[in-house]
Amino acid sequence: MTGFPLQPGATIGIVGGGQLGRMLALAAARFGYRIAVLDPAADCPASQVANEMVVGPYGDEAAMRRLAGLSDVVTYEFENVAVEPIRKALGDTPLSPPAEALEVSQDRVVEKAFLNGIGVATAEWRAIDAAEELAHALLDLGGDCILKTRRFGYDGKGQARISAQTTFSDAFEAIGSAPAILEKRVPFAFELSVIAARGRDGSVAAYDPAENVHTLGILKTSTVPGRIPPEIADAAKAVAGQILTRLAYVGVIGVEFFVGNDGTLLVNEIAPRVHNSGHWTEAGCLVSQFEQHVRAIAGLPLGPTARHFDCVMENLVGDEVRRFDALVAEPATMVHLYGKAETRSGRKMGHVTRVAPLSKPL
Ligand code: ADP
Ligand code: MG
């Protein structure tokens, strides 16, 4: 096994070969690193740009061991990796971000308890294990709430809105009767996210927060600087830094926030990986979130996070990818497609980032 910092020619293993794994692989290649990807699908988006594919289920210990055998460090592009199998399979191969970050972020109850435990405010919440517990929790939280599965939710999936009129058994069934969390609905003015990183030397760097708009639970646009006042941006960056340090984290993290009309910041959730709302960094910054993650896990110094353009990142979901010809003809737009063979409704197929000169000088 090589020591840190990783030298060109070393291999980074990525669990998950979706678009995030693909973009990590592209960034790693610029430093001469090799990429091995573990994914159940041989033709996953990252396979087109990876040096080695390990095809197998994520929970498969043998497949994970094969990945570890090929890799000098292992990282992941999504948080639903079973922790014990990965710990066992990796042996001496370092895992970054650490397994603790997986544990905290893959269960919404553990996540909220962790955040509140380090003094970070969230929506009010109650753990729900059975439909019978809903009525009491709803009374406790005072009405208008969202029920979410504790695990495996993404892009708004595994969620049901609940009000006094809702039939509790229907709501619980709607999310598959899985262990759940009931969250008070936050009447936010807007949502923002911070993409931040912590290096092996403990240094922390954060990008400017993005204002995020979701359509049907899926991120539609991330706008920087959006409507975010500098003091809220600084406060959100500080919270992200606090989370990174408490987790002894190495790598890039995405922290999603709700911003109240009075400027109150509540953390919605954390993602221990590069994040869709940070895709603008590839067009707006010298060092993208993908390179930053590679730098962190390879033991290199973190790169600059200064923003050189105002940016609007827009996801291309489903058929929107068919606008390709028009998008590549735009004068100030970076187009990035994920190489997915099949276009499906609700599927993220690519994104574009439109840039403009900075509204406020650096
Ligand atoms: P996912 O893992 O699917 O991203 P989130 O918890 O981030 O799940 O929820 C998706 C979106 O739903 C959020 O970005 C926000 O727009 C809305 N949402 C989630 N929880 C709440 C809440 N407690 N109050 C208001 N809106 C919420
Ligand atoms: Mg989210």
Image (cartoon, grey):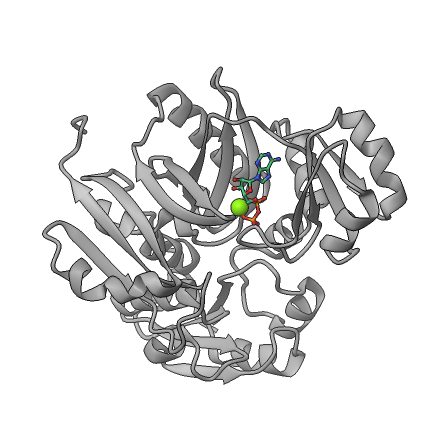
Q: Is residue 83 above or below residue 352?
A: below
Residue 247 visible here: yes
For the point 13% across and 36% down, the residue is: 357
For the point 49% across and 41% down, the residue is: 255
Determine whether, in the image, residue 248 is placed left or right of residue 159: left
Q: Quadrant of the C terminus?
A: top left
Q: Quadrant of residue 178?
A: bottom right
Residue 286 visible here: no
Q: Pick whichever, 293 or 284, lies toward us.
A: 284
For the point 79% across and 55% down, the residue is: 177
Q: Position of residue 27 (x, y in %)?
A: 30, 63
Residue furthest top in the image = 262
Q: Position of residue 29 (x, y in %)?
A: 29, 70
For the point 57% across and 37% down, the residue is: 268
Q: Position of residue 125 (x, y in %)?
A: 72, 34
Q: Quadrant of residue 267?
A: top right
Q: Is residue 353 above or below residue 80?
A: above
Q: Position of residue 126 (x, y in %)?
A: 77, 36
Q: Pick whichever, 345 or 333, lies toward us.
A: 345
Residue furthest right in the image = 132
Q: Is residue 189 above or below residue 62?
A: above
Determine whether, in the image, residue 47 is placed left or right of residue 303: right
Badge count: 0
Q: Quadrant of residue 234?
A: top left
Q: Pick whichever, 227 or 131, lies toward us.
A: 131
